[in-house]
């Protein structure tokens, strides 16, 4: 697990990103998708989720009902851990990060997820989107994935993303302010062969080795965590 701060030039703009790279081929590495407070619908500090599970790394995951008046803050889309479906995204076409028990990971099309889940080979999944990179090239299908919010379609904002390199490394990245097309180019430049956006804005958070690298501005519903077996 390697943490670095990197600067990326996209067009005439410069972006400083925080990046954590994880070797998924290392037998000590474990991935988990976790719900706040151990239950769907709750919220919690990202650091608290990480610490409770003994995680070295944690990043915010799927979008959720952050603005509802209700005490129940449900996540949107698929969340799967240890093969168990915690949240169902059967009606979503949004990009989904999936991995099997051997940590072979990819970014799947949301429309394929019901069939992939039925096949039973998915150990973990986080659905967010949109897709950013496929085959090492920027690929954006934002409206086809069903996004309508200007925060995704055109605005700049704090962003979180994940990507997978050619040699099976997982890239977790946060950047303080970028549009989705800028984020896609940053992920491509960071070496991702596949990449997708995660929840962002006040949700954008990255935790590493006992402290925040990027502190979220709100309590979160769910997270992707990385543990190192001793």
Image: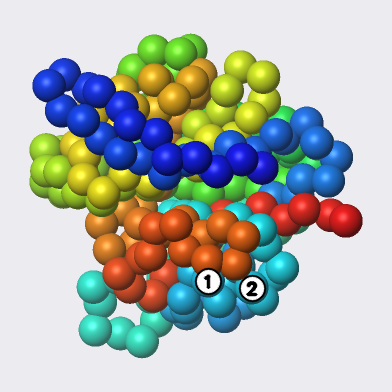
The colour mode here is rainbow
Task: Identify the residue at image location x=45%, y=29%.
Answer: 195
In the image, taking residue 107 as reference, residue 201 lies left or right, namely left
Circle 1 sits on which residue?
A: 47
Task: Rate crowding at label 1 as few (under 14), some (14 to 19) or many (20 or more) other CA atoms within 10 Å.
Answer: many
Q: Is residue 144 visible?
A: no
Task: Identify the residue at image location x=58%, y=37%.
Answer: 21
| Vertical placement of residue 153 versus 54, above or below | above
Circle 2 sits on which residue?
A: 51
Q: State yes or no: discs 1 and 2 in contact (Cβ < 8 Å).
A: yes
| Vertical placement of residue 116 versus 70, above or below | above
Q: Is residue 47 visible?
A: yes
Task: Identify the residue at image location x=44%, y=25%.
Answer: 190
x, y percent for residue 58 = 56, 58
x, y percent for residue 98 = 61, 39
Local secondary structure at mark 2: helix
| Vertical placement of residue 46 versus 18, above or below | below
x, y percent for residue 77 = 45, 53
Task: Identify the residue at image location x=36%, y=87%.
Answer: 71
Q: Residue furthest bottom?
A: 71
Quarter of the image for residue 14 reads top left
Task: Rate crowding at label 2 as few (under 14), some (14 to 19) or many (20 or more) other CA atoms within 10 Å.
Answer: some
């Amino acid at each position: 697990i390697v943490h670095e701060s990197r600067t990326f030039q996209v067009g005439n703009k410069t972006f400083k990103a925080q990046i954590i790279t994880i070797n998924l081929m290392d037998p000590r590495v474990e991935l988990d998708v976790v719900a706040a407070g151990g239950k769907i619908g709750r919220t919690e500090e990202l650091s608290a989720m990480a610490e409770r599970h003994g995680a070295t790394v944690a990043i915010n995951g799927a979008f959720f009902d952050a603005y509802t008046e209700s005490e129940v803050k449900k996540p949107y889309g698929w969340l799967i851990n240890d093969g168990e479906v915690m949240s169902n995204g059967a009606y979503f076409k949004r990009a989904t990060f999936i991995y099997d028990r051997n940590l072979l990971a990819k970014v799947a099309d949301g429309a394929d997820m019901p069939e992939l889940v039925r096949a039973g080979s998915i150990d973990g999944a986080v659905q967010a989107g949109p897709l950013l990179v496929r085959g090492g090239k920027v690929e954006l299908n934002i409206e086809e994935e069903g996004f309508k919010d200007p925060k995704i379609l055109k605005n700049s904002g704090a962003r979180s993303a994940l990507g997978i390199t050619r040699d099976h490394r997982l890239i977790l990245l946060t950047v303080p302010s970028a549009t989705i097309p800028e984020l896609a180019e940053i992920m491509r430049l960071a070496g991702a062969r596949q990449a997708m956006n995660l929840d962002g804005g006040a949700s954008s958070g990255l935790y590493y080795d006992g402290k925040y690298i990027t502190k979220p501005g709100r309590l979160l519903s769910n997270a992707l965590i990385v543990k190192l077996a001793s």
